[in-house]
């Protein structure tokens, strides 16, 4: 398993990115035959809850977004349900920037039924939309489109991009050719 280096603007984070890759490899990566959320099959799976369940690991991952928050200066941090919302909550707490959550499906109960977005926002605000792990990016791109329909300016970032998704990430996993069977 390999990974591509982070963007040049974040080269100062290389030790932290290497820590993240090692932590993923030690705690969250499993081999086998898996059906991924998007319906594709893979011979490896990254269980983000093995990372997010440890408060010190979760905080350290959230801190990796500090240069991105500084660069983008968003008005809101957004997260997709479920893993993205966990990450967005911690980043919001650490940066003191309000957050919103983008649901996969609108809730059918309580106030504001039939809405995908939970939390206050104002048209024109800049939003940093966070996701945990993406393979093809369909879900997070749908969340981005929902936010853009509300006239919000959205930048998407993930902790891990394991495939062909057009999403920036802290870590871009790549597999050596012929070494794995992945249908991303």
Image (cartoon, rainbow, N blue to C red):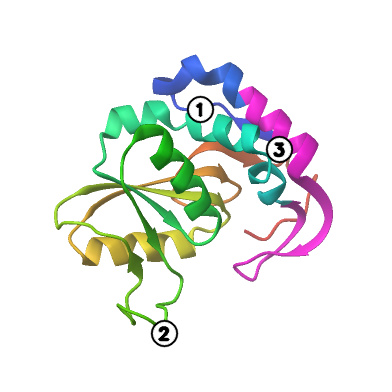
Q: Is mark 1 on a helix, strand or loop?
A: loop
* Residue at image mark 2: 108
What percent of the width, then of the height, locates residue 33?
A: 82, 61
Q: Does the rendering let one see residue 105?
A: yes
Q: What stretch is highlighted in magenta?
A: 18-45
Asked if residue 41 is among those painted magenta in the image, a careful observer would answer yes
Q: Magenta stretch: residue 160 in it? A: no
Question: Is 59 left or right of 148, judged from the image as shown?
Answer: right
Position of residue 86 relative to residue 69, above or below, is: below
Which quadrant: the C terminus? bottom right
Identify the disc placed on residue 6: 1
Mark 3 = which residue?
24
Of residues 15 and 86, the one drawn nearer to the viewer in this rendering? 86
Circles 2, 1 touching at the beta carbon (< 8 Å):
no
- Residue 173's place in the image compared with 149, above or below, is above
Judged from the image, the secondary structure of the residue bearing numbered disc 2 is loop
Q: Do the residues labelled 1 and 3 touch (CB within 8 Å)?
A: no
Counting other residues with Cα less than 10 Å from the Cα at mark 1, is it few (<14), some (14-19), or many (20 or more)?
Answer: some
Left or right position of 83 against 107? right
């Amino acid at each position: 398993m390999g990974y591509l280096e982070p963007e040049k603007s974040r080269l100062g984070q290389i030790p932290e990115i290497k820590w993240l890759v090692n932590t993923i490899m030690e705690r969250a990566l499993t081999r086998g035959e898996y059906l991924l959320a998007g319906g594709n099959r893979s011979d490896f799976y990254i269980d983000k809850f093995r990372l997010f369940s440890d408060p010190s690991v979760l905080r350290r991952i959230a801190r990796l977004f500090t240069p991105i928050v500084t660069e983008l200066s968003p008005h809101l941090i957004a997260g997709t349900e479920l893993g993205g919302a966990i990450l967005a909550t911690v980043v919001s707490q650490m940066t003191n920037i309000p957050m919103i959550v983008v649901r996969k499906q609108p809730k059918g109960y309580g106030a504001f039924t039939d809405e995908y977005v939970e939390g206050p926002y104002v048209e024109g605000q800049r939003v940093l939309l966070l996701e945990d792990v993406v393979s093809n990016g369909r879900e997070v791109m749908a969340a981005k489109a929902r936010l853009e329909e509300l006239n919000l300016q959205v930048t998407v970032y993930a902790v891990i991009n394991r495939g062909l998704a057009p999403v920036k990430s802290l870590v871009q996993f790549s597999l050596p050719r012929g070494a794995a069977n992945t249908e991303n």
